[in-house]
């Protein structure tokens, strides 16, 4: 399975100590160079800075070979490169949180999921307690989710838990 990641899911999964979930679910993850640069921002959380100093071997940083795509101008550099890398590599999945980036990826036929989808997948496979990880995500990071999204996520976690009991 070929998986490409944008900065946001990496950032949040690292902050809640769930980054290893990516390897457990997908094996390796391709990350565009622009995403690494975004994660290196001076105001990045210390956990992210530390992770970058010791990037896991299942992360593969790639340089996008395609020219800039005018249709992606409204997105930040990491999102643009993540979508372009997903296209170049014929990725099975793009990890991206931002609504506009997800919309553009889907228009291009790229399957997407975000931070919450990764947590749910990990919970579904019994690798993590997704509800507990979600609680850390919304209380210990800048991650924001509308109340209906929070309710839906919690409901899905409890349904998973009921199925596994």
Image (cartoon, helix red, strand yellow):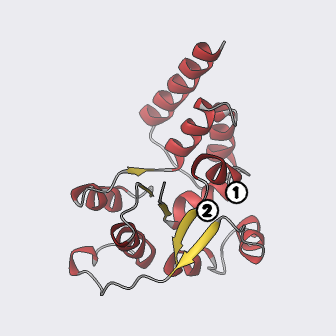
Q: Horizontal and vertical percent for residue 97?
A: 45, 55
Which residue, given by chain and number where applicable, does mark 2 sit on?
11
Vertical order, 146 against 18 (above or below): above
Numbered disc total = 2
The quarter of the image holding the C terminus is top right
Left or right of 80, for residue 121: right
Give SS at disc 1.
helix
User: Residue 120 lies in what quarter of the image?
Assistant: top right
Left or right of 48, for residue 92: left
Res. 154 mark: none
Which residue, given by chain and number where applicable, does mark 1 sit on?
15
Q: Horizontal and vertical percent for residue 153?
A: 51, 32
In the foreground, 124 or 115: 124
| Label 1 – label 2 distance at C-alpha | 6 Å
User: Residue 65 lies in what quarter of the image?
Assistant: bottom left
Instruction: Please report the residue visible at 71 percent of the width from the left and 68 percent of the height from the top.
Output: 57
Q: Residue furthest front?
A: 1
Give SS at disc 2.
helix
Instruction: Please report the residue visible at 51 percent of the width from the left and 25 percent of the height from the top.
Output: 156
Vertical order, 127 against 63 (above or below): above
Q: Are marks 1 and 2 in contact (CB under 8 Å)?
A: yes
Q: Horizontal and vertical percent for residue 132?
A: 69, 34
Vertical order, 122 against 56 (above or below): above
| Classed neighbour count for the residue bearing mark 1: other residues with Cα under 10 Å, few (<14), some (14–19), many (≥20) | some
Instruction: Please report the residue visible at 52 percent of the width from the left and 49 percent of the height from the top.
Output: 144
């Amino acid at each position: 399975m070929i998986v490409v990641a944008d900065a946001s899911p990496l950032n949040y999964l690292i902050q809640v100590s769930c980054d290893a979930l990516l390897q457990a679910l997908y094996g390796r993850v391709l990350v565009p160079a622009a995403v690494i640069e975004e994660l290196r921002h001076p105001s990045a959380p210390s956990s992210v800075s530390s992770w970058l100093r010791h990037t896991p071997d299942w992360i593969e940083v790639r340089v996008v070979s395609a020219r800039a795509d005018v249709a992606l101008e409204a997105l930040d550099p990491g999102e643009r490169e993540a979508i372009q890398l997903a296209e170049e590599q014929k990725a099975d999945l793009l990890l991206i949180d931002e609504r506009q980036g997800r919309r553009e990826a889907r228009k291009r036929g790229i399957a997407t999921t975000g931070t919450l989808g990764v947590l749910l997948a990990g919970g579904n496979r019994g690798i993590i307690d997704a509800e507990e990880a979600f609680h850390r995500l919304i209380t210990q990071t800048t991650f924001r989710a509308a109340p209906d999204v929070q309710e839906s996520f919690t409901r899905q976690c409890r349904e998973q838990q009921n199925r596994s009991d």
